[in-house]
Amino acid sequence: MPSEYGPRREGNNPGGIPMNGITDERQRLLPHGNGNDIMGNRQQIMGTSTTEYGAAVTLASKSQPNGMVNMASRGTMLTKSYSVHANGSASYLTPLQLGRHELYEMVPFTAVFGMQQKERNISRAFASYAADLDSMEADQLSFSQNNKRMSEAELNSRRSYTSLLLLDEFEMDAVLVTTPLIIAIFVAGISQFLVGYNTSVMNSPSSVVFQGHNTFQWSVAVSAFAVGGPFGAIMAGSLVDTRGRRGALTINTYTFLGGGILQTFATNMLFITIARFIIGFASGFSSVLVPIFLGELAPPTLRGTLGTLTQFCLVTGIFVSDLLAFPLATESSWRILFSVTIILSVAQIACFPFLIESPRWLLHRDKKSRRARLIIKKLRGLRHDHEIETEVNHFISASHAQSCGDAEERTNSGGAFVAMINDDRMWKLLVCSLILQMAQQLCGINAVFYYSTMFFDGLIENPLIGTAIVGGVNVAATYVALFLMESSNRRTLILWSAGGMLVSCIGLVVCLLGYFDKMASLFFVVTFVSFFEIGLGPIPWLIVAEMFEAKYVATAMSASCQVNWACNFIVGLLFPYLQKSLGAYSFAPFAIVLLMTIIFVIIWLPETKGTTPEELRENIVRSLSTMLQLSDESTNDADTSSSVGNPIDVEWRRAMDSLRRQEEEDMKRGLFNFGFQPIEQDGLSASESDWRSRITGGA
């Protein structure tokens, strides 16, 4: 049978095979011999808790063959460990499962660019916590059996081994990707690619699409994309809850397809404008839906990675549209340039038969959903019912922990928004988040992506080359930003970003005034985009996931998205007029916005670069002080007589019932140790010896 320590491990080290890739040499260095001994058969690292943290009191840890420890409590069969806590509840999860449980509750169900550091910090904090408990339990067991404490070197060795073993298992969740998840990533990634592609696709063919249009017609057509965005973001918040994540993604794809068909076969600028509005609607819809859809499918340790992947899909879409403009931005081929949206939408539709629904959404509608359990089985690569039920419990408890009152699953919950407004601290954080979204768009970045070809016309020989260079630098800078966010504070990155963009704006104005060669303007546009991508580009989105509690993240994201699209529309509509009226000073308004952003960050913006591992550890201790259980509803509704559970539950239920009866007999005879006084070493009767053997695991 699979190892109880992890759903993807098989056997309990059969034939002496080193576990988890650990060599025999490393096992010999461990105290207590082989890997099975040091981990208490791996299942019991966290089988008991400790009074050191003041909230959990270990009563007993009953070792059985193959490391299975069971206890019946309140009619619920516990197949993992027996540990009673201060509130009278019992633990039933292995250390690995407890760690995953904490990750589910502390990492929001949203795929956000750059969130990997937070995920790693939580994993390390829990691994350290579990390793400490394991070493203390091992020390107590050694003292009870041999009347000898473990040495400091042995404790450190055991602590290090346990921590590394848990981290290794957590890492597996981040690298094991199943086929259903790959298909979901592919479909969602195309949606984000289309958002980026259609952001920039109107940039290059401005002079060849329906020649003779005026500035107003073209600027309205371009900015119509941003008009549809906020409407799409609003609708997404409703449809993802009523139609499901998969259903909403289907609607989003057909919307992209309809807009692409209308844009490709348009007969005049009016149809182009309508098509841009529809595609903008789909893009706003996608910007809300995709992070939620992927965040609910992926394990917690993979959500930041998928958020990063979707961001790369977006900037790659911008770059690809710039590259395709070289052969296709002509009077005879511009329709082919627009048809890419149709082709990719059809590719998404072809994947729909294999696309899965979010198990979190299904479990919200019905906690007994067999469809949700089947999806979880395929999504996580699980094989046994008890593994699936454990994962289901992770989803249910995390959804409850991240809920706001009765609005547990509402992605754009009005209740959550009201709760944020009424909370003095939360509404200030919300204002900070919205101001950063305004700064991200009003700094003028989309003036570059929408109109760089028009801007470079007359400054460099081939404007398409300048636009492509900017698109390529945008992708490279996104990659650099990923590493900078690992090591730098958020406020520092935004200050460097806004400061660099401000200097670039000043340099660009100086170039346009004729003080430098006009080719230097390309350099300043490139630095403008580069500095944007290391700070003002990703941080306003990442900061939402870091600044708010997990239960507020989806609502804050939705509000931020709508403000972002509204400011996007303002820039897209007004920049052509700024260029005409201000000439060389067209980037001066953006410089003013950037200066105000710097002042705001210095004075008001809090630092949010994640909680330190020590603080996370304290949070985990507090969290585990009240033991993890199935919710009352799911526990009461559970059919304990069903086959759902460990395949050997029935056998161990009998064993535990027998053990319970023996303890009751000890209580009647006055031989049971309630913990008030130690039992004398001398003069133990046979029954008393039996009692001690049960307490110490048969030693």
Image: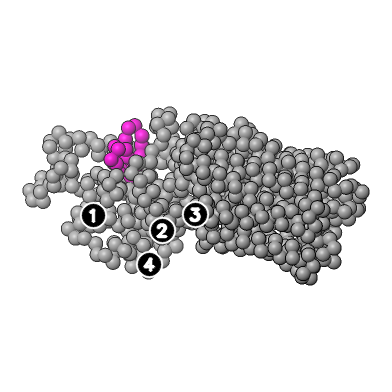
Q: Which mark is residue 165?
A: 2
Q: Nearer the viewer, mark 4 or mark 2?
A: 2
Going from the N terminus, do you reach mark 4 or mark 2 first?
4
Q: Which mark is residue 607?
A: 3
The amino acid type, in three-letter code, at marker 2 is Leu
**Direction from residue 392 to residue 277 in the image, left or right:** right
Q: Which mark is residue 182?
A: none
Is 444 located above or below residue 524 in the figure? above
Q: Which mark is residue 26?
A: 4
Magenta: main secondary structure equals loop
The span from disc 1 to disc 2 (Cα, nearest Å) is 21 Å
Q: Residue furthest left?
A: 683
Q: Is disc 4 in contact with disc 2, using a CB cutoff of under 8 Å?
A: no
Going from the N terminus, do you reach mark 3 or mark 4 first?
4
Residue ID at (73%, 60%): 471
Going from the N terminus, do you reach mark 2 or mark 3 first?
2
**Magenta segment, which residues?**
70-91
Q: Is disc 1 in contact with disc 2, using a CB cutoff of under 8 Å?
A: no
